């Protein structure tokens, strides 16, 4: 079975799109980074290293130091698919991140985005 092409895309190539989406709605890069750190357990320095090294999405999530167990509380639809129903683990992690960025762009409060 061939991997979905997003798995081999560098996280660094998509990251600016996350930031742009947030900034278009008056949110910030630091909020995007906070979401990514919350989801993956990366420190800011580790996140920046991942971006500099242009790790692909699959590696980015495989190397995540501490995936947040509260991510399982993320529900909803991204790209026409319910994130909680995605069976492939890496794709689910990618879609969790997409959903969190969507919530940020829609103006949701950070404590709700981060499932506090």
Image (tube, rainbow, N blue to C red):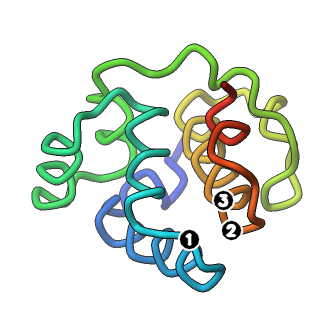
Q: Callout 2: 10 Å neighbours few (<14), some, many (20+)?
A: many
Identify the residue position indicated by label 2 in the image.
Answer: 105
Between marks 3 and 1, how big is the CA–CA gap? 7 Å
Q: Position of residue 30 (x, y in %)?
A: 38, 59
Among the two numbered marks 1 and 2 on one chain, the one whose residue lies closer to the N terminus: 1
Q: Position of residue 95 (x, y in %)?
A: 65, 47
| Marker count (numbered) | 3
Identify the residue position indicated by label 3 in the image.
Answer: 104
Between marks 2 and 3, how big is the CA–CA gap? 4 Å
Q: Callout 3: 10 Å neighbours few (<14), some, many (20+)?
A: many
Among the two numbered marks 3 and 1 on one chain, the one whose residue lies closer to the N terminus: 1
Between marks 1 and 2, how big is the CA–CA gap? 7 Å
Residue at image location 45% in from the left, 33% down from the top: 38
Q: Secondary structure at mark 3?
A: helix
Q: Callout 1: 10 Å neighbours few (<14), some, many (20+)?
A: some
Most extreme residue toward the top, as rendered? 69
Circles 3 and 1: CB distance less than 8 Å?
yes
Residue 6 is left or right of residue 66, and the answer is right
Circles 2 and 3: CB distance less than 8 Å?
yes
The C terminus, quarter of image: top right
Most extreme residue toward the bottom, as rendered? 24
Residue 107 is left or right of residue 47, and the answer is right
Depth check, front residue: 105 or 67: 105
Residue at image location 70% in from the left, 21% down from the top: 72
Circles 1 and 2: CB distance less than 8 Å?
yes
Identify the residue position indicated by label 1 in the image.
Answer: 27
Q: Is residue 90 above or below residue 94?
A: above
Q: Secondary structure at mark 2?
A: helix
The N terminus, quarter of image: top right
């Amino acid at each position: 079975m061939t991997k979905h092409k997003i798995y081999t895309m560098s996280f660094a190539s998509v990251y600016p799109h996350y930031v742009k989406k947030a900034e278009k709605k008056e949110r910030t890069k630091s909020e995007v980074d906070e979401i990514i750190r919350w989801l993956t357990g990366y420190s800011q320095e580790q996140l920046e290293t991942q971006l500099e090294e242009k790790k692909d999405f699959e590696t980015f999530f495989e190397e995540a130091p501490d995936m947040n167990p509260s991510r399982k509380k993320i529900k909803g639809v991204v790209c026409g698919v319910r994130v909680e129903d995605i069976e492939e683990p890496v794709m689910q992690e990618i879609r969790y991140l997409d959903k969190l960025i969507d919530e940020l762009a829609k103006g949701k409060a950070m404590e709700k985005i981060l499932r506090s």
